[in-house]
């Protein structure tokens, strides 16, 4: 009896499947969709066109009017994605060609008013990293502020005020509990070998995101050096200008602008020595603000909350192009960064991450070796070894991967490296 029931159920499913994949279904749903399209009910027409194309994926009229409908519908996230998919369809027909044109118009309209930006440089490889906008104000903790003159902290707070005053959503809240911090600000001594053979690695501060294995942004670590390589305190202006720049990183702008008029421009090491950051107080540019606004409209792949999605978000490939295009732009950006900062390990680490995303693991290892030769802090040494372990893991060189991971663990024993070691050991078994 049970077997007969299951057979009967299978036959019913088969009949429905054949019906939905039949020419009759394709024509019925197309006619229904076309009628709704003619009436201007574009959102209601979309699912019927999709049912028609499910039955007949190469239906010429259904594909063309589907693109027309998407171009006229409200450009919510799902519509953006569907039009992007049609524009990049493997079926090279008039519908696909027209979708490319309409995609350009859709992008133009979505970016109206914020088109002059450097969003390509704001991403982190193929990832869009930013906070959930509902998380503002971001909680900021100052670790041992008495280690530096009082004006260090007040200058950093003034930089926060500028970001707040120039946007309608960025807010910060100073807290006293370090475990609750979104942005963890600390102060440390300059490395002993900051100057060698008359050449100084001149930096005021740096920012590093703390990201879990499942792409959850835990916090942003913003570290200021107490003094410059000559052992002198930084001026209030230097701290303020640097804080203004580094806060942009903590908000999710992970790269740099190519325009020297922007706060997020990456200046040369030699410019620090020429008192570039001492000359005048910096101010957020329109491009800085437009980039941040656009960043917070794009659906993130790394954020402090899981599964963050909204139909009001922008579809990243529509704004930034496909993965290969984005990675190539990041590759160019980090190569320029290394030219500006040849003595900084961070540029080589970032370059290695892009090579890893491109699957060029040998180039990634070369960049990491260059970074290792320049690493001066425990955080940098940890990142080099951790990324080396991942790269060897991807190359299936298990012994080397485990060795690097264990060395990284000896520097910082966190969940990420423990999970990586577990993965490596399981693969080895």
Image: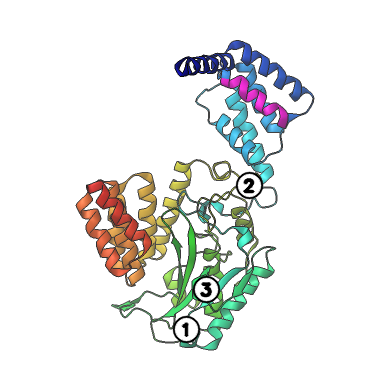
Task: Say which element carries label 2.
Answer: loop
Image quadrant where residue 409 sits: bottom left
User: Are the residues tagged 1 and 2 within 8 Å (C-beta)?
Assistant: no
Relative to the observer, which residue lies in front, 301 or 179? 179
Considering the whole magenta stretch, tell me its main secondary structure.
helix
Q: Residue at x 56, y 59 (%)?
A: 131
Q: Residue 338 in the image: x percent, y percent?
A: 38, 61
Q: Are marks 2 and 3 in contact (CB under 8 Å)?
A: no
Which labelled disc corresponds to residue 144?
Answer: 1
**Left or right relative to 413: residue 58:** right
Relative to 359, is 206 above or below? below
- What secondary structure is marked by label 3? helix
Which numbered disc, 1 or 3, marks the residue closer to the eye? Answer: 1
Give neighbour class at mark 2: few <14, some 14-19, many 20+ (Cα, 10 Å): few
The magenta region covers 43-54
- Left or right: 264 with respect to 209? right
Q: Is residue 31 above or below residue 300?
A: above
User: Which residue corresponds to the image point at 43% horizontal and 74% vertical from the top-left?
Assistant: 203
Instruction: Give the residue pinned by disc 2.
Output: 310
Distance from disc 1 to disc 3, alpha carbons, whole Å, reads: 19 Å
Of 260 and 375, the residue lying toward us: 375
- Answer left or right for 350 relative to 138: left
Mark 1 vs 2, N-terminal side: 1
Left or right: residue 133 compared with residue 185: right
Extreme-front residue of the structure = 1
Residue identified by numbered label 3: 242
Indicate the quadrant where residue 173 lies: bottom right
Quarter of image, res 58: top right
Going from the N terminus, do you reach mark 1 or mark 3 first? 1
């Amino acid at each position: 009896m049970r077997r007969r029931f299951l057979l009967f159920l299978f036959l019913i499913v088969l009949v429905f499947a054949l019906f939905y994949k039949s020419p009759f279904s394709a024509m019925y749903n197309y006619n229904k969709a076309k009628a709704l399209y003619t009436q201007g009910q574009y959102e209601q027409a979309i699912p019927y066109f999709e049912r028609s194309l499910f039955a007949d994926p190469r239906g010429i009229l259904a594909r063309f009017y589907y693109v027309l409908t998407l171009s006229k519908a409200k450009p919510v996230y799902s519509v953006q994605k569907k039009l992007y998919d049609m524009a990049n369809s493997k079926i090279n027909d008039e519908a696909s060609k027209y979708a490319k044109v309409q995609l350009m118009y859709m992008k133009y309209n979505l970016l109206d008013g914020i088109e002059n930006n450097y969003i390509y440089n704001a991403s982190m490889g193929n990832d869009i990293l930013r906070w959930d906008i509902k998380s503002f104000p971001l909680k900021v903790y100052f670790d041992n502020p008495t280690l530096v003159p009082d004006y260090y902290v007040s200058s950093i707070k003034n930089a926060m005020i500028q970001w707040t005053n120039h946007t309608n959503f960025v807010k910060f809240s100073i807290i006293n509990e370090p475990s609750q911090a979104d942005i963890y600000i600390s102060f440390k001594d300059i490395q002993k070998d900051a100057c060698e053979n008359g050449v100084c690695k001149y930096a005021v501060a740096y920012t590093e995101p703390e990201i879990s294995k499942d792409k959850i942004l835990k916090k942003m670590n913003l570290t200021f050096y107490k003094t410059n390589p000559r052992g002198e305190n930084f001026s209030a202006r230097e701290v303020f200008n640097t804080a203004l720049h580094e806060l942009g990183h903590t908000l999710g702008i992970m790269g740099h602008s190519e325009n020297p008029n922007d706060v997020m421009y990456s200046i040369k090491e030699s410019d620090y020595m020429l008192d570039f950051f001492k000359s005048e107080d910096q101010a957020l540019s329109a491009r800085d603000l437009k980039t941040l606004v656009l960043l917070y409209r794009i659906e993130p792949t790394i954020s402090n909350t899981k599964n963050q999605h909204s139909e009001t978000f922008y579809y990243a490939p529509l704004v930034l192009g496909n993965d290969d295009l984005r990675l190539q732009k990041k590759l160019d950006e980090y190569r320029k960064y290394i030219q500006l900062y040849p003595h900084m390990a961070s540029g080589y680490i970032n370059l290695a991450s892009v090579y890893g995303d491109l699957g060029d693991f040998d180039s990634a290892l070369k960049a990491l070796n260059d970074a290792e030769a320049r690493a001066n802090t425990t955080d940098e040494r940890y990142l080099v070894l951790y990324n080396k372990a991942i790269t060897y893991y991807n190359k299936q060189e298990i012994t080397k991967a485990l060795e690097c991971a264990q060395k990284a663990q000896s520097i910082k024993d966190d969940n990420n490296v423990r999970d990586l070691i577990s993965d490596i050991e399981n693969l080895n078994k």
